[in-house]
Structures are given as structure tokens and as C-alpha cells.
């Protein structure tokens, strides 16, 4: 909400079956600050994660408004100029499908999921690797060229698929290593902390329960 943008934007939080306490807090803050909240429990009984529904809904809304779609996950913190800088970068690159901000930890070191970018100089570069949706801007051209109804409903996460589809449809994806955003991995999915605390249990849950399919 503190972002400084040169054009109007709509900020929507998708509440994916959080606790009653969190849902109430979101409603209170939405009334105070002027953002929108969609409680997915009001529109589906499908258990979390509901990323597919969120992506399809957001794409429909963005196309109707001829707008860019910026995805910011709840474990990511932006700077006030982050979104404007991404938008400016996209305006300079008409072939862009996805513009992604690099993620860093609280000390400023590049972290997951962009560890491969640690050695890259600061700037903007096309990338054949997938763009994470930690903080990514999807252009109207990509939204027009790829219908999210084609996404596999048996998966949980879609950044890899959509990144590849952007390239397959003749667009380029760009990583902005000069626009760091703070990423606290998996804060929105506490069970994934097991990856660091008890990796054997994490991978047992991941594969036996079919969680986190990308």
C-alpha cells in the first residue's frame, strides 16, 4: 500500500483458508487501508493451496482492465519503488512476458529461489530459467497469449509452467537483479520449515502426501 506508482492499481489479498483471527485482521486492515480481500473459503471448498483459482481469477480481472498482473507472495517485502521500477522496465521491453525482482535475505544476500543469480551483475537480463512468483509482473501480452485454463489442476504451483509458456509463445522473461525484495522463505507455509529443520521428514511428507507439485 506504500508503493509509489504513476498509474492507478488495485491491491487484492487472497486469503487461502487462514485462521479466523487472521481473516478478521485482514478485514479490519482492508477497511482502514483500502485494499481488497478475497476469502477463498467463501468461493471454494477446495483445501489450500488454491493458487490455480487465484491465478485464473486474477488473470480474468487483469484482462478486463487491460492491466498488468503483479504477483507478490505473502513472505515477501517490497520497497516503495519496486513496482514502479518493474513497470518502467517492462515499458522499455515490449517483448517482455514476465519481469521478476530478485530475492534477498534480510542481510541483502541473494537467496532462494534465485541462488543461481548470485554471480550476476546488478541490472536487468533475459533469463531462460523460470521466474519465481515471489515478486513478478506478468504483462497483458502474456495474459492474452496464454490462457490459464490450460494449467494442470493436479499441480500446486505454476511459476515454472507459466515461465516456460511465456518463452514458448515468443516472449522473453527478465530478471531484475537491481530490484531486491526481501524473501523469508515459506513463512506462509510453516510445514516447509521442515526442509531446514528435518529434511528427511520434509521429503517424506512431500512425496508420500503429494505436496508442493510444480
Image: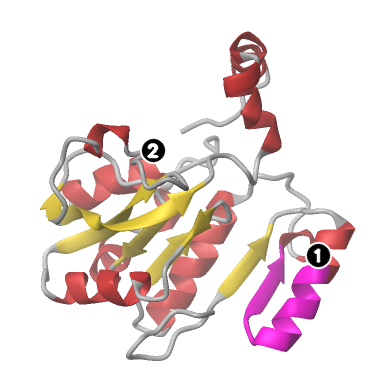
* Above or below 176: residue 4: below
At a point 25% along the width and 62% down the height, the residue shown is 145
Which numbered disc, 1 or 2, marks the residue closer to the eye? Answer: 2
**Numbered disc 1: secondary structure:** helix
> Colour scheme in the image?
secondary structure
Label 1–label 2 contact, CB within 8 A = no
- Alpha-carbon distance for marks 1 and 2? 30 Å
Q: Is residue 9 left or right of residue 179?
A: right
Seen as rendered, the residue at the extreme front is: 107
In depth, the one of 8 and 108 nearer the eye is: 108
Q: Main secondary structure of the magenta part?
A: helix
In depth, the one of 113 and 53 nearer the eye is: 113
Where is residue 153 drawn, in percent x and y? 54, 42
Where is residue 210 drawn, in percent x and y? 62, 23
Labelled disc at residue 9: none
- Residue 83 is a magenta residue: no
At a point 65% along the width and 14% down the height, the residue shown is 198
Labelled disc at residue 111: 2
Image quarter in which the N terminus is found:
bottom right
Where is residue 128 drawn, in percent x and y? 17, 40
Identify residue for label 1. 23
Q: Write down the region rendered in magenta.
A: 25-39
At a point 50% along the width and 55% down the height, the residue shown is 76
Seen as rendered, the residue at the extreme top is: 200
Q: Which image quadrant is residue 206 in?
A: top right
At a point 45% along the width and 62% down the height, the residue shown is 71
Q: Is residue 134 visible?
A: no
- Residue 27 is a magenta residue: yes
Amino acid at each position: 500500500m506504500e508503493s509509489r506508482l504513476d498509474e492507478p492499481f488495485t491491491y487484492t489479498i487472497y486469503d487461502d483458508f487462514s485462521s479466523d483471527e487472521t481473516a478478521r485482521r485482514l478485514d479490519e486492515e482492508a477497511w482502514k487501508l483500502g485494499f481488497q480481500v478475497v476469502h477463498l473459503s467463501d468461493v471454494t471448498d477446495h483445501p489450500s493451496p488454491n493458487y490455480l483459482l487465484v491465478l485464473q481469477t486474477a488473470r480474468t480481472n487483469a484482462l478486463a482492465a487491460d492491466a498488468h498482473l503483479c504477483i507478490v507472495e505473502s513472505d515477501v517485502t517490497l520497497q516503495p519503488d519496486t513496482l514502479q521500477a518493474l513497470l518502467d522496465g517492462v515499458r522499455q521491453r515490449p517483448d517482455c512476458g514476465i519481469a521478476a525482482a530478485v530475492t534477498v535475505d534480510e542481510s541483502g544476500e541473494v537467496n532462494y529461489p534465485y541462488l543461481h543469480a548470485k554471480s550476476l551483475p546488478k541490472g536487468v537480463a533475459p533469463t531462460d530459467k523460470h521466474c519465481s512468483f515471489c515478486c513478478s509482473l506478468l504483462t497483458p501480452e502474456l495474459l492474452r497469449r496464454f490462457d490459464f485454463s490450460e494449467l494442470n489442476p493436479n499441480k500446486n504451483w505454476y511459476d515454472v509452467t507459466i515461465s516456460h509458456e511465456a518463452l514458448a509463445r515468443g516472449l522473453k522473461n527478465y530478471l531484475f537483479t537491481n530490484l531486491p525484495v526481501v524473501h523469508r522463505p515459506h513463512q506462509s507455509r510453516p510445514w516447509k520449515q521442515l526442509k531446514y529443520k528435518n529434511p528427511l521428514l520434509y521429503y517424506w511428507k512431500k512425496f508420500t502426501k503429494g505436496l508442493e507439485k510444480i
